[in-house]
Each structure stands twice: as C-alpha cells, then as structure tokens.
Image (cartoon, grey):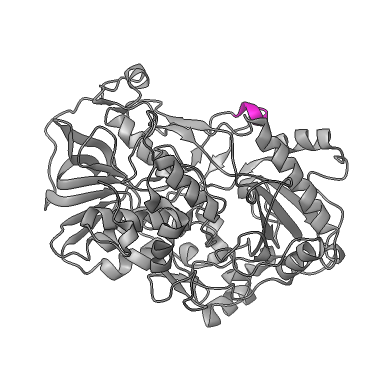
Amino acid sequence: MSAAPGPAAEEEDGGEFDVVVVGAGSAGCVLAGRLSEDPALRVLLLEAGGSDDVLEVQVPAALYKLWRTRRDWNYTTEPQPGLGGRRLFWPRGKLLGGSSSINAMIYVRGARCDYDEWAELTGDPCWSSENVLPLFRRTEDNARGADASHGAGGPLRVEDPRSPHPWSRAAVQAAVAAGHPRNDDFNGPRQEGAGLYQLTQRRGRRWSAADAYLRPAEGRPNLTVRTGALATRVLVSAGRATGVEYRRGGRRHTVAAAAEVVLAGGAVNSPQLLMLSGIGPAAHLREVGVDVVHDLPGVGSGLQDHPLVPVIWPTRSGRSLFRGESPWGYARWFAARRGPLSSNLAEAGLFSRSRPGLPAPDLQFHFLPVEFWRQAEADPHVDAFTAAATLVRVHSRGTVRLRSADPTWAPAIDPGYLTDERDLDALVCGVEQAREIAATPPLAAVLGEERSPGPAVPTAEGLRRAVRDTVESLYHPASSCRMGVDDDAVVDPRLRVHGLDGLRVVDASVLPTLVRGNTHAPTLMVAERAADLITGRTVDPRLSGTA
C-alpha cells in the first residue's frame, strides 16, 4: 500500500499556524500552554482522542476504568519470547491529557545520575541533574512549599496522599524494619529508601497535564485545540517540515506550520507518525509501502519499558481498596475528596538495589493495598495486598515498527522484555526483597500465605520461571526516538530531528535512557525545556543550550 497522498485535502478554518503540536498528552499540553504564552505565536494542538471531562478521570482510584475503552489507544505488544510468548497490554491515554489522565499520578523524577548520564550521552550539559532542576522546580506547585529541591506556584499541583491506607503505612514501616532507610521525599537529595509517594493531585482529585497547562490557556486567542484529529503524515518539502496532514470528521485536512512541527505523541505514536511520513529506517519503510523521504535508521529503535512482577498476598483481616467503590466511598469523595476513592492505588514505594555496588537503585516497589493482577483485566474481587517489584534500570531493548502504511493500523510493539538476562536476575532479587518485607512486622501481621508467585516457588531457579510467567508492564515506554549525537539517534540535544529542519520530537520517546522512576515528571520537564528552546526563553543562564 502506498503512502502517497490522494485527492487534494480540504482545509479547516485557520489553515496556517506558527507551531503545530501533534498530541495533547503530557508533553503536548505543556507545549500548548507555554508556547501560547507568547501572543505572537499562533499555536495549533491536534489530539486524536476527545475530552477528558469524565468522572473516571477525576476520581483517582478509577484510573483503570478507562483502560480498554475509546479513551485508550489499547495497544498490545508482540508475543514476547522472554515471557514465554505472552503479549502484554499497554494502556495509553487517547484524550486530552493523554496518559496523565489515566495514570497512577505518582510524582517521581528519577535519580540524579540519570540526568548526568543524559548529559554525557548527548554531549550537552544542559541535560545534567544540576541544569534540569530549575525546570522541575518551575513545573511544581508542591503542597509542602518551595525549597532547594521543589517549587511552589507552578502549574503542576503535587500533594501527599489524602487518605493513605493503613497497609500502605505498614509497608513503609516493614521496609524500614527490614533494613531500608526511610525516605519521605523521593525527589529530594537522595532517592533510595521507603516512603509514601507524592501525587499529581489537587485536594483528592487528579491533576493531569491538561488541568495544569491546557485549562489555563484555553481562552487565549492564539491557541487552537482540535480533538478527534488523527495525524496521518508530516508534510516535508525540500528537507523541511511544512505542516501536518490529519483526518477529522471523516475528511482529510492539511495544516501549514510556518515555524515548526512538534511531535508529542509518545513513545509509540511519535515513531509511528515519523515512519508514516517516510522518516525512518529506509528498508523497513519500503517493506510496508511507504515512500522514503528521509532515511533515519534509529526511528522506532531502542524502545525501553519498566517491567514489574506483582507479588500478591491475601490479607488476614481488614478491607482493601476494592471495597472503596461503594456508596460510602463515593459519599466521602464527593463530600470532602477523601477516603478510598482519593487513592492512586500505589500509595507507598521503595527504591533499592538488587545487589551491592550498584551506583544507584535499580529496583522500585509499588505497594498497593489491593489485588493488582493480570493488568487489571477484571476488577479485584478479594481483599489482598500487592508488592509490585519493578526494574527501573533496564538493559533489554525493543522496537516500534509499522504493520502497514495505513495510519489507522496499530504499530507492531516489541519491547524485548527480559531479552537481557541481567533484567531477569534483578527482578528475581526484587521478588526476594518483597518477600522479606512482607515477612517483617507490622506488615507480616496483615498478610496471609503468598498467592503469587506462591510458596511452591522458593528457589532462585523456580523464581526465574515464575518471573517470566508473571512479568507485566508499568506502562513507561520510552527512548524510541532517542536524543543523541550518534548515528542511531533520532533527535539532537535540542530535540530537532536529525537531517530535517522545522521538526522536533518532544515526549518520552526522546529520553536517552529510561529514568529510575515514573516517567510523567521527566516528560513534563523535557517539554518545559523544549518550550524554552522554541521561544528562546530560559529559566536559568545555564539552560541556554548549544547552537
């Protein structure tokens, strides 16, 4: 099938803008909000999905209720050889706010060494931990107030859990009793240790990127937002991106970009759109019938994700969060934005090392006072506790590839889970650490006999098999349009696509490596920096960038 254009596309009102942003997820909302602060810039934001004005977005504990619906891209990976041929479900937000409207709201930036490694890999000191800190602080409106590590008054509200479950507090106490340090701020001077997560919430309600950046900008005359607009191609002429083709209302449209086109679709959709536009590995594009516009081998390569192993115990007594969806639970949430429905489910966490000598934690734990099993295919039905042992320093790599030149086809997603044995070894250690914490008071008094992997898998070899059988995704895809200066990099340190003018990628796909932690906060930071690069504005003299 050819990707060549058909009949002349019809234009909507306002067919030319200065900057066209594709994707209204975490990064796209930041870009729309920040760029439109300049009244001289005409900004268009295109979003394939629709409104985020639904109760399931606002109620934190309802996050998984939107998975596998029309507000979810509802992706599934290719069969994974490292997981016995299993396919994994990947929810990705298809609505304003993107995945920030359906995620677990955990605010974690990653370790400082992650960003120092970015600076080394890109050759640009502006990506170092010291130089990205002002951007992180600029995003924040932290309920604890401003200090050397945090900001106040920014667009993104960050708060402590409103009504943490007693089992979450017990998990933190047990982790400390088992020898892990207490840490009440994973974004402070050190990451390692156990504590409650801070969340992107405002008074018990989700605070997405759309709430933080898009809502305040909606009334600006220089910002246009079009939902239900599926981008199908970046238009390129004489080595420069000149606009975007998209489908909306059953018709095909084009829009011109006088200055830049910015892709912010995420680690799946951005490489897909580049390849649909003829920008990517030439041999692959020809295989699926796409005319090659610009041979860029790294597009869609280097995909990374955080794998996790859920370790689950039934509880001896008490009520887990699955009982929160009740008249009593809704009454508390509507009246005071408190109670079990204000929970993000994964309330407490721990960063640790799978073995001594590592320079930084490679494991992250999410402690959930609820059963979380088989990627929430069904609602929890028993009182249970889950410790999700997550690998945050990933060695395995995968790809995003086209199945067809038809933009309505989902791409082929192959994360390559556990193709590097080091990942498997670390996750086995993670399960062992979860068991040790579960056996330590006060958590030990709450939990019954382990259900998964189960007491029948006590040995390391048995655990290796069990890990392969039960690994799931933490839904943190990244690095498929990697930033760098080597031959396989897709964008340069200023997020410009190598070899083309007027085209940037700004989302989690550009991360040189996955950070040690959840990816929402780093994605916002990258988008803040991109807005500075596009407008020529900086928050700090050290962030002036390179020519």
Q: Magenta stretch: residue 123 in it?
A: no
Residue 312 shows in this picture: yes
- The residue shown at (75%, 64%) is 171
Position of residue 433 measured from the top left corner of the image (x, y, whole percent): 78, 51
* Position of residue 4 in the picture relative to residue 185 (left or right): left
Location of residue 468 with respect to 307 vertically, above or below: above
Residue 25 shows in this picture: no
Instruction: Please tell me whether the stretch drawn in magenta is mainly helix, strand or loop.
Output: helix
* Position of residue 17 in the picture relative to residue 206 (left or right): left
Position of residue 271 measured from the top left corner of the image (x, y, whole percent): 37, 36
- The residue shown at (50%, 54%) is 66
Position of residue 512 measured from the top left corner of the image (x, y, whole percent): 45, 42
Q: Nearer the viewer, residue 517 or 101?
A: 517
* Position of residue 260 in the picture relative to residue 279 (left or right): left
The span picked out in magenta is: 80-84
Please identify the quarter of the rendering in which residue 438 is found. bottom right
- Residue at the limit of the structure toward the bottom, as seen here: 335
Quadrant the N terminus occupies: top left
- The residue shown at (52%, 78%) is 144
- The residue shown at (43%, 49%) is 70
Q: Nearer the viewer, residue 432 or 488?
A: 488
